[in-house]
Image: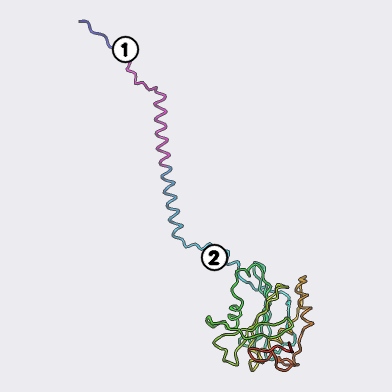
């Protein structure tokens, strides 16, 4: 039997060589992309672990710029005339806050001793919205080395700025030699007057010393602050008298120098 001759042409696979080459290239590219993605993933994991190990306090950066700072070479804006400062040195300090507040602080102390009196004139800025109770601040200034103590009212005294609230420590209300703090808000001029005093040999004398200090407080420079200038101009018309060379008022004992719960002057 005669055999059939084999075909002279190779068997066809059904895939064009160009398509086969393209498929091989796509596979190689996919492998490279997966390798790159794996490397990037390892880098990301390492970065996260490094930053997790760092104790970063980003909130500390802006808060450091929110502190009160003492300003040098600033002319005083206030003064206390005829202050009974025998043997004591007066100091004047201006502090500013980045949010706009300003504090003028007057203090009196004998050489090498702690202050016997302090007067602060505070013109609030934006920082006031986050401040604590004013009474706590005064107590901290009056007894900076003391622990947290209960604050108690000590009555009021009269001044050219009107009635001024007094305060002290509740655990010392039986001590006739206790120091007294004071606080007066004057919203019309955006001003808070506060401080404390240990002057005087008795509690009535210390109450009178505070009243006289406030009556002798004068404005040196308003710096285009019309409400502040008007406040002091009106207050001068109500200024009371103090005995010459003494912190006690010339008037007899009344709601300024009387007991903790003073009586109003005059008839109702």
Q: Quadrant of residue 130?
A: bottom right
In the picture, residue 88 is in which quadrant?
Answer: bottom right
Residue drawn at point x = 46 percent, y = 57 percent: 51
Task: Give the labeled residue for mark 1.
Answer: 8
- What quarter of the picture does the N terminus occupy? top left
Whether label 2 touches label 1, CB < 8 Å? no
Q: Residue furthest left?
A: 1
**Residue 17, percent from left and from top:** 39, 23
From the viewer's perspective, tell me whether residue 236 is left or right of residue 107.
Answer: right
Of 63 and 120, the residue lying toward us: 120
Percent x, y of residue 79: 73, 81
Q: In screen coordinates, is 134 left or right of 51?
A: right
Query: As rendered, which of 179 and 54 lies closer to the eye?
Result: 179
Q: Residue at x 58, y 67 (%)?
A: 64
> Is residue 75 part of the magenta span, yes or no?
no
Q: Which residues are magenta?
A: 9-35
Quick check: 147 above or below 97? below
Question: Badge 2 is on which residue?
Answer: 60
């Amino acid at each position: 039997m005669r055999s059939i001759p084999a075909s002279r042409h190779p068997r066809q696979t059904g895939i064009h060589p160009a398509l086969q080459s393209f498929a091989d290239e796509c596979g190689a590219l996919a492998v490279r992309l997966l390798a790159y993605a794996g490397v990037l993933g390892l880098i990301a994991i390492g970065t996260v672990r490094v930053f997790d190990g760092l104790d970063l306090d980003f909130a500390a950066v802006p808060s450091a710029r929110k502190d009160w700072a003492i300003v040098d070479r600033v002319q005083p804006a206030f003064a206390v005339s005829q202050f009974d400062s025998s043997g004591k040195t007066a100091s004047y300090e201006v502090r500013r806050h980045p949010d706009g507040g300003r504090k003028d602080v007057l203090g009196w102390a004998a050489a090498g001793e702690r202050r016997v009196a302090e007067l602060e004139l505070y013109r609030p800025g934006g920082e006031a919205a986050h401040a604590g109770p004013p009474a706590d601040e005064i107590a901290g200034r009056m007894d900076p080395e003391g622990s947290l103590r209960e604050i108690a009212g000590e009555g009021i005294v009269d001044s050219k700025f009107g009635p001024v609230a007094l305060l002290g420590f509740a655990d010392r209300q039986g001590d006739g030699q206790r120091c007294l703090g004071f606080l007066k808000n004057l919203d019309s001029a955006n001003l808070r007057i506060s401080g404390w005093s240990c002057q005087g040999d008795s509690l009535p004398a210390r109450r009178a010393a505070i009243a006289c200090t406030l009556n002798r407080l004068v404005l040196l420079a308003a710096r285009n602050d019309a409400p502040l200038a008007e406040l002091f101009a009106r207050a001068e018309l109500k200024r009371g008298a103090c005995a010459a060379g003494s912190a006690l008022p010339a008037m007899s004992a009344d709601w300024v120098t009387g007991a903790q719960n003073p009586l109003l002057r005059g008839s109702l």
